[in-house]
Image: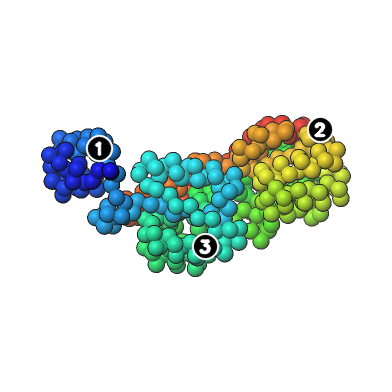
Amino acid sequence: MSSTIKDVAKQAGVSVATVSRVLNNLPGYSEETKRRVEQAVEELGYQPNAIARGLVNRRTETIGVLFPSVSSSFSSEILHGIEEVAHKHNYSVIVCNTAEDGKRTMKYLQVLREKRVDGIIYSSGVLEPEYYEAVQAMGVPLVLVATKSDWDDVPFIKVDDRQAAYDAAAYLISQGHREIAMIGGGESDSIAGQPRYEGFRQALRDHGLPLREDHVQDGGFTFEGGCGAAERLLTASPEVTAVFAAGDEMAIAVISVAARLGIAVPDQLAVIGYDNLKLAEMSNPPLTTVAQPLHEMGRMASEKLIEMLATGQPAASEVVPHRVIERQTVKKR
């Protein structure tokens, strides 16, 4: 049978009210009393009831996290960072899969409202006005990760996608490539698709290289989409010597399709990805890519949310650094 708060009070030689104050970090007891209560909790294996505790401090010590694709490697690495910090501060995490088009977002926001979460982290997708208004109605803080915010009271953590894509293309140019193609995620995606296209195109213009629209394909940020885009590109444009894929899954798709078509990477075709997922190290050959610090971004999102819960004030947004990780899929010409 599990221990109760009364058992803890009896073993520590204090009142139930004192145990409650210690567990909820309220004042009114000595350090010695705190030590005895904590020792009794440990010895008895007492687990405070989250609902009952929430009635005292008006918190459930839970965080809601919304991802467009929970199963993706991208989301997984961010989530690990979020959970690492959340658990350190004794918060539980509720993860919601909103689907790629966000059609389940409003439904999950209602679920999180019913669960009385203390705050929300929203990843990757566009924060639509209706989502913002729903969170405002809940009266809880909101932090964005791998996306941007149009509201001053909603901080975000992300890389500069335009500059990162520019740097990826410039790296290929520095290695002697001139016929460079791109497989992106679609220009209708204002968060990652459009700025990465813009960065790629600007790098080509700045280095005096022609921009051929048939060298730009949409892979939808998926392995399957990347395979289709790579097939179209490599069969129609044999002059291409390098490909920038705006996501590692698409980059690995390019390597796979190239192998099937008898095109050697990196001897005949250079490939650079984007994200630096664990998959990048496991590809054959290992993938050169632009690294986003996804785990650290998740940690920062969690830290900012907990800071906002503690202070009641918005935290500052941050643009985090990216870098090119050189492996074995780009060879100097």
Compared across the picture, whether 98 is left or right of 64 comes to right
Residue tagged 3? 105
The nearer-to-camera label among 1 and 3 is 1
Label 1 belongs to which residue? Answer: 44
Tell me which label, 1 or 3, sits earlier in the chain: 1
Q: Residues within 10 Å of mark 3 (few under 14, many from 20)?
A: many
Whether residue 114 can be seen here: yes
Q: Are marks 1 and 3 in contact (CB under 8 Å)?
A: no
How far apart marks 1 and 3 lie (CA) works out to: 41 Å
Task: Give me the residue at 44% from left, 40% from top.
Answer: 84
In the displayed image of the protein, which residue is found farthest to the front? Answer: 1
- Residue tagged 2: 267
- State the separation of the CA atoms marked 2 and 3: 45 Å
- How many numbered dots are placed on residues in this image? 3
| Cα gap from disc 1 to disc 2, whole angstroms | 65 Å
Q: Report whether 30 appears left or right of 119.
A: left
Numbered disc 1: secondary structure: helix
Can the viewer see residue 241 in this picture?
A: no
Give the amino acid type for the residue marked by disc 3 in the picture: Thr
Decide: few, some or many residues near mark 1? Use Cα within 10 Å; few <14, some 14-19, many ≥20. Answer: some
Residue type, numbered disc 2 = Asp
